[in-house]
Image (cartoon, helix red, strand yellow):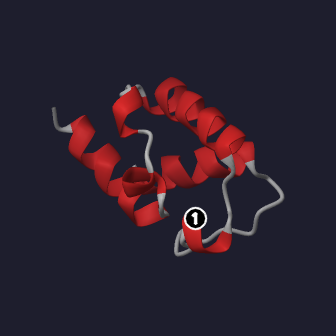
Amino acid sequence: MKIKLLDAIREIRPDLEFDGSVDFALHGVLDSLDIVLLVDEIEATLGIEIEVSQINPDVFSSFVTLLAYLNESSQR
C-alpha cells in the first residue's frame, strides 16, 4: 500500500521530490486541487473509496496519517 500511495502522489505531483516523510500541512506540499486529484487517483488505483467526511486535515495532514487511514479503510 505504501508504494502505491507514493506512486499516486508522484502521479499528481511529479515535480515533488517526496520520500514519504514530509508533513503535507507543515510544508504546503498539497493544495486543495492536489487533494481532490489525489483522492481520485487513490480511488482509481487502490480501489478504496474515501468518504467526503474523511477529506480533512486529520487524514490528509501527512503521508503517515493518510497511509494509516487507507490501511484501516482497506480492512473494512
Q: Name the quadrant containing residue 73.
A: top left
For the question of whether residue 48 can be seen, the reply is no
The image shows residue 27, relative to residue 54, as above or below, that is: below
Classify residue 46 as left or right of residue 21.
left
Q: Nearer the viewer, residue 47 or 34?
A: 34
Residue 40 pos. (x, y %): 57, 28
Residue 71 pos. (x, y %): 28, 48
Q: Residue at x 30, y 56 (%)?
A: 68
Classify residue 51 as left or right of residue 60.
left
For the question of whether residue 71 can be seen, the reply is yes
Q: Name the quadrant containing residue 34.
A: top right
Q: Residue at x 56, y 66 (%)?
A: 25
Residue positioned most to the left: 76
Q: Residue at x 45, y 54 (%)?
A: 57
Q: Nearer the viewer, residue 17 or 38?
A: 38
Q: Badge 1: how crowded within 10 Å, few (<14), some, or many (20+)?
A: some
Residue 46 pos. (x, y %): 44, 32
Look at the numbered disc 1 and give the secondary structure of its residue. Answer: helix
Q: Which residue is mark 1?
A: 24
Classify residue 42 as left or right of residue 67.
right
Q: Residue at x 60, y 42 (%)?
A: 35
Residue 56 pos. (x, y %): 43, 46
The image shows residue 21, relative to residue 69, as above or below, that is: below
Classify residue 41 as left or right of residue 55.
right
The image shows residue 42, relative to residue 1, as above or below, that is: above
Callout 1 amino acid: Phe
Quadrant showing the C terminus: top left
Q: Name the quadrant containing residue 23.
A: bottom right
